Image: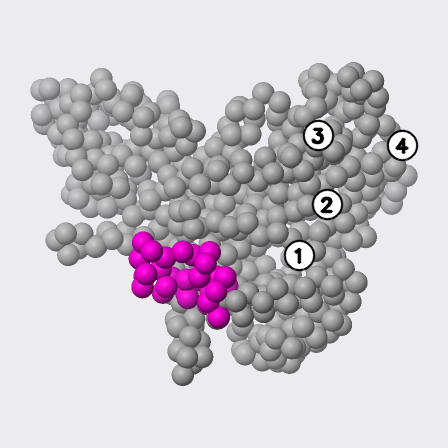
C-alpha cells in the first residue's frame, strides 16, 4: 500500500508540474512574451520568437548578468565574437570528433530520446520521493526537525540515496568506457519506459553529432565547409591574446560574452528549455596554473549568490556535480533550478584546465601564452568557465513568477512576481479618465520617467481592470493620475506585490521608482 500511495502521489505531482508549465506557456503567448516561430505556417519545431514583453525581460536579464560580470569586476572585460569561425577552430576544440549525444529510439512510439536524460529523469523521480519524505517529516517535527540527520538515518532516504549512487556509478563507468551497450542495459534494468506511451521496447544506444554544417564561400585550405558555433567559448579563446595585449590585462582576468549558439538537437522539447538556436552568457576566467581550484570555488559561490539575489527561493537551486567530466575539465558542476518539469541544469561551472589554449596553439601554430613578470616565465593559463543559458534563465524567471492569488474578497488575480529590476515594464501611467486634462498630465509624467525606465501608458477600461493587466505582465508600480493631481501635483502610487496605494508628489517619483526597480536592489 505504501508503494502504491507514493506512486500515486508522485504522478499527481508530475501532473501539477505539467499543468503549471502549460499555464506558463499559455500566459507567455497571451501577453506577448514568447511566440512560436513562423506561427502563421503552423510553427517550426524548437524555434521561438520573443515578443514585445519577452525581449524586454530578456534584455534585462542580459543587463543584470553583464553588470555583475563586467561592470562589477575591474578584471573582466566584454567581447562579441563572430558566429562564423575558421573550421579548424572546432577541430581544435574537439567538437568535430567528440560533440555527440547518446540517443535511443523507442520502437513503438517512434520517439527518440537522449539516453542520459532518460536516466537523469529516473534519478529525478527518486529525488522527488526523498524530497517528499523530507517535507512530511519537516511538517511533523516543525522547528525541531534536523534535515541532515533525517537524511542520514531514515531508512527510505538512505535506501533511495544508495540507489541513486549505484545508478550514477554504473552510468559513469559506462560513459567513461564509451560502452553504449552498458548504457542501454542500465535503461533496461531500471525499467525506464517511454514517457509518452509507457513502452519499454528500446533500440540500441547510438552517438549523434550535434554540429550544424554549412558552407561559406571558399575557405583557404579547406573545402568551404563551415560550422555554426555550438558554443560561444571558442570565440573567447581565439581572442585571448588580442584582449590580453590590447587591454594590458594581468592574470587573473576574465572575458565575458553574450551570443547565439546552435546545436543540431533532434529531441528539442519542453517549450524554450531545449532549442536548436539559443543564447549563452559565458565568462572565461584565465588564472595561473595551480590556482584553478580556488577560483572554481569562488565562482561557484559568486554565481549561486547572483541567482539567489532575484528572490526566487533558496530551495529553487541546487548544485549537481558532473558524473562524467568533459575531456577538458578537472572539475565541473551545474547549478540546477527547480523548473515545472523538475530540477534541470541552469548554469554550468567548469574548470577547463589549459586544454583549450594548448589545443589552439597546436592547431594554429601561434603561441597563446601569458608572460608572468614576477616568475619571469611564459605559460599557458588555466581557465575557469561560467556559462548560463539565457533562454533557460528566461524560463526560470517566467515559471517562478507566475502565480494566482486569492484576495480578501474572494476574487482572484494573476500576477507575475518578477524581480522589479528585471520586469519588462517598470511602471504604468494610468489617467483615471480619458478627459478633463488627465491624459495630458499623465503624458507629462510618462515623459519625465521614460528615459530611465520602460513605461507603459494605459487609459482603456476601469482602473481595476488596468491594475490586473499590469499585474499579469509583472509591472512593479502603477501611477494613477486623478483630478486631485491637477490641484496638488501628486499621484497615487500602487505596488504590485502588496497592492498598497500611497499618495506621492510628482517631484518624488524619479527617486521612488529608482529605489523600487533599480539595479541597486539586486546588488545590495
Residue 376 location, x and y as percent? 83, 18
**Disc 2 target residue:** 329
Left or right of 348? Residue 517 is left
Name the front one of labels 4 and 3.
Answer: 3
| Inter-mark Cα distance, 3 to 2 | 14 Å
| Inter-mark Cα distance, 4 to 1 | 34 Å
Q: Which residues are magenta?
A: 126-155
**Disc 4 target residue:** 365
Name the front one of labels 4 and 1.
Answer: 1
Identify the residue shown where x is 44% and y is 76%.
7
The answer to which of marks 3 and 1 sits earlier in the sequence is 3
The answer to which of marks 4 and 3 sits earlier in the sequence is 3
The answer to which of marks 1 and 2 sits earlier in the sequence is 1
Q: Do the residues under discs 3 and 2 have CB atoms within 8 angstroms?
A: no
Let me know if residue 140 is in the magenta part.
Answer: yes
**Disc 1 target residue:** 323
| Inter-mark Cα distance, 1 to 2 | 12 Å
Identify the residue shown where x is 79% and y is 50%.
96
**Disc 3 target residue:** 287
Amino acid at each position: 500500500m505504501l508503494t502504491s500511495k507514493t506512486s500515486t502521489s508522485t504522478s499527481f505531482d508530475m501532473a501539477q508540474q505539467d499543468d503549471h508549465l502549460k499555464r506558463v506557456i499559455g500566459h507567455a503567448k497571451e501577453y506577448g512574451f514568447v511566440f512560436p516561430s513562423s506561427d502563421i505556417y503552423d510553427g517550426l519545431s524548437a524555434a521561438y520568437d520573443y515578443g514585445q514583453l519577452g525581449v524586454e525581460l530578456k534584455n534585462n536579464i542580459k543587463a543584470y548578468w553583464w553588470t555583475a560580470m563586467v561592470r562589477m569586476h575591474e578584471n573582466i572585460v566584454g567581447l562579441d565574437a563572430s558566429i562564423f569561425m575558421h573550421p579548424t577552430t572546432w577541430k581544435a576544440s574537439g567538437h568535430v570528433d567528440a560533440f555527440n549525444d547518446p540517443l535511443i529510439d523507442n520502437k513503438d512510439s517512434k520517439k527518440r530520446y537522449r539516453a542520459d536524460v532518460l536516466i537523469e529523469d529516473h534519478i529525478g523521480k527518486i529525488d522527488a520521493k526523498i524530497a517528499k519524505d523530507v517535507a512530511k517529516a519537516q511538517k511533523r517535527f516543525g522547528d525541531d526537525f534536523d534535515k541532515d540527520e533525517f537524511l542520514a538515518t531514515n531508512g527510505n532516504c538512505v535506501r533511495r540515496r544508495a540507489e541513486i549512487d549505484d545508478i550514477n556509478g554504473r552510468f559513469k563507468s559506462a560513459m567513461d568506457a564509451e560502452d553504449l551497450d552498458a548504457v542501454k542495459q542500465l535503461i533496461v534494468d531500471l525499467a525506464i519506459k517511454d514517457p509518452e506511451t509507457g513502452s519499454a521496447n528500446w533500440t540500441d544506444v547510438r552517438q549523434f553529432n550535434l554540429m550544424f554544417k554549412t558552407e561559406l564561400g571558399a575557405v583557404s585550405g579547406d573545402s568551404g565547409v563551415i560550422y555554426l558555433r555550438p558554443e560561444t567559448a571558442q570565440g573567447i579563446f581565439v581572442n585571448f591574446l588580442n584582449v590580453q595585449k590590447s587591454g594590458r590585462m594581468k592574470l587573473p582576468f576574465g572575458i565575458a560574452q553574450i551570443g547565439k549558439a546552435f546545436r543540431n538537437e533532434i529531441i528539442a522539447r519542453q517549450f524554450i528549455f531545449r532549442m536548436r538556436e539559443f543564447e549563452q552568457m559565458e565568462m572565461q576566467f584565465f588564472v595561473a596554473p595551480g590556482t584553478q581550484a580556488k577560483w572554481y570555488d569562488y565562482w561557484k559561490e559568486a554565481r549561486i549568490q547572483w541567482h539567489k539575489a532575484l528572490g526566487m527561493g533558496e530551495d529553487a537551486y541546487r548544485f549537481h556535480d558532473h558524473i562524467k567530466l568533459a575531456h577538458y575539465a578537472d572539475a565541473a558542476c551545474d547549478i540546477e533550478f527547480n523548473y515545472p518539469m523538475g530540477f534541470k541544469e541552469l548554469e554550468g561551472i567548469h574548470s577547463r584546465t589549459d586544454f583549450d589554449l594548448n589545443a589552439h596553439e597546436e592547431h594554429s601554430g601561434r603561441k597563446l601564452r601569458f608572460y608572468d613578470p614576477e616568475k619571469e616565465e611564459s605559460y599557458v593559463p588555466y581557465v575557469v568557465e561560467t556559462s548560463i543559458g539565457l533562454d533557460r534563465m528566461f524560463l526560470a524567471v517566467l515559471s517562478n513568477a507566475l502565480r494566482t492569488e486569492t484576495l480578501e474578497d474572494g476574487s482572484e488575480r494573476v500576477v507575475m512576481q518578477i524581480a522589479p529590476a528585471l520586469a519588462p515594464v517598470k511602471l504604468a501611467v494610468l489617467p483615471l479618465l480619458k478627459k478633463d486634462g488627465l491624459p495630458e498630465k499623465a503624458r507629462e509624467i510618462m515623459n519625465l520617467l521614460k528615459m530611465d525606465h520602460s513605461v507603459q501608458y494605459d487609459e482603456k477600461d476601469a482602473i481595476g481592470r488596468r491594475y490586473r493587466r499590469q499585474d499579469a505582465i509583472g509591472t512593479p508600480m502603477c501611477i494613477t493620475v486623478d483630478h486631485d493631481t491637477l490641484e496638488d501635483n501628486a499621484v497615487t502610487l500602487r505596488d504590485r506585490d502588496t497592492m498598497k496605494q500611497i499618495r506621492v508628489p510628482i517631484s518624488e517619483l524619479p527617486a521612488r521608482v529608482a529605489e523600487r526597480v533599480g539595479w541597486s536592489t539586486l546588488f545590495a
